[in-house]
Amino acid sequence: MNVFNRRLLPTLIPLFLTACAGGAPKPVPQQPVATVTPVAPVDDVAVAPKLLRPAQPADFWAGMRESFAMPGCEADPKVLAWARTYTRSPNRFEQHVNEVLPLIVYAHKSAMKHSVAGEFALLPWVESQYRHVPGHKNRPAGMWQIMPQTARTLGLRVEKNYDERLDIAKSTESVMTMMRRYYDDLGDWRLVDVAYNAGEFGLKKKLDRHGGPTNDDGLPDVPMKAVTRDHLVKLMAIACIVRDPARFNVSLPKRDAENALQVVQVSNPQSLAQAAKQSGLSMDDLRDFNPAYRTNKGTVSSSLLLPKSAADQYKLGPVASSTDAADAVAASVPAATQASGKAKKSTAKDERRIVFYKVNSGESLWSIARRHQVSVEQLMTWNDLQTKTVQPGQVLKLSASR
């Protein structure tokens, strides 16, 4: 051992002994069980997100409010002013909403399909109050008030006897597709309405020149004509009423599932008269739901829009004539029974088709029952009515279901 090692050894030995003593693990004091916060099991973590989902809307209007994406009633004083103008006569406002409710529901369903803000289901109120406005020459047409040039862009047919701008299903689908494209380009639902009223390309030029809106809580502070600004204000005003109807002393009508509009596919071309007979609707009511047909002599070749009750009837197939019904019944009745013409006649009568009736303004269940020579109790039973109250636009069965 050299001198260097002899000098270093006394220093290393204490360090080595210290290291050996420190190498043994020290016991870790256990925490009291009572102070430990329990950890959720893995299975509970997987379920947790479901508990965070909002409750299902209690009614249609609650769901519509949740789909709104624009500023509310306080966005601008003009919004409240127009909301009060619309509801100046609460009863008249409620009646009109009830009459067009199936159209509002249908438009909202399409808006949700295309991820469009719920306010745009109310846009026809501003454009036409949901009336099927006929287009003349270069004028806008339909409840969406679509110009001929816009119709060509959207691929909607505009002909002398048939105008798809008035086709509720096709025009709504086209408009909602366009609204979604506008939003993808503009990124602001308020500007989507401006583009719909004033034109997309003109708005984009103004935005390129002046920049986008800086106010997110009110009307967009971008240059626009007064009529365009009023268009947006009116749309926000209708949405304002839906947001808080009690504020304007109105009650929104309850949605009736039997009046929900459905698209029914037509397997074989048929006349409007045949379609009306098969659906149990009058010609006027059929054309009211399908206003694209300008005359009663149109031919249905693709689809029809019908309320649920009429759609269910239509899907049953063509309605046979009374003679055909009697022959069909006779073929299924035993020969001994066929010997009685009375039995055959009564059976054929029981196979009559269901007739539907659309309630007009001012009518009551009593007046409808009296006109069609049935009792009020029968109408209530056939239509599962809990009260004797009926609303304009409501579709009633005038005979028992078979």
Image: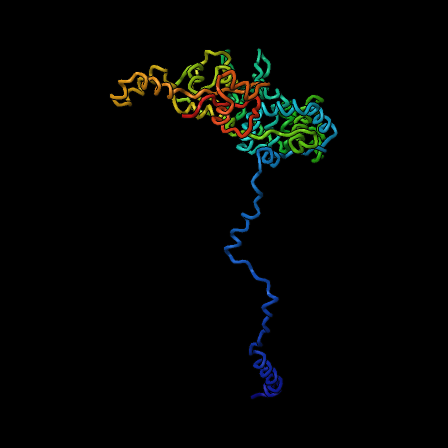
The picture quadrant where one finds residue 230 is top right
Query: Measured from the top left, where is residue 4 in percent x and y?
Result: 60, 85
Q: Quadrant of the C terminus?
A: top left
Q: Is residue 236 left or right of residue 323?
A: right
Q: Relative to the observer, which residue lies in front, 322 or 235?
A: 322
- Position above or below: 288 against 214: above
Q: Residue at the spot x=56%, y=40% of the render?
A: 56
Query: Measured from the top left, where is residue 88 in percent x and y?
Result: 71, 23
- Position above or below: 97 against 137: below
Q: Residue at the spot x=59%, y=79% of the render?
A: 22
Query: Measured from the top left, where is residue 260 in percent x and y?
Result: 51, 27
Q: Quadrant of the N terminus?
A: bottom right
The picture quadrant where one finds residue 9 is bottom right
Asked if residue 399 can be seen in this view, the reply is yes
Q: Relative to the observer, which residue lies in front, 342 or 170?
A: 342
Q: Residue at the spot x=43%, y=21% of the render?
A: 354
Query: Measured from the top left, where is residue 191 in percent x and y?
Result: 65, 29
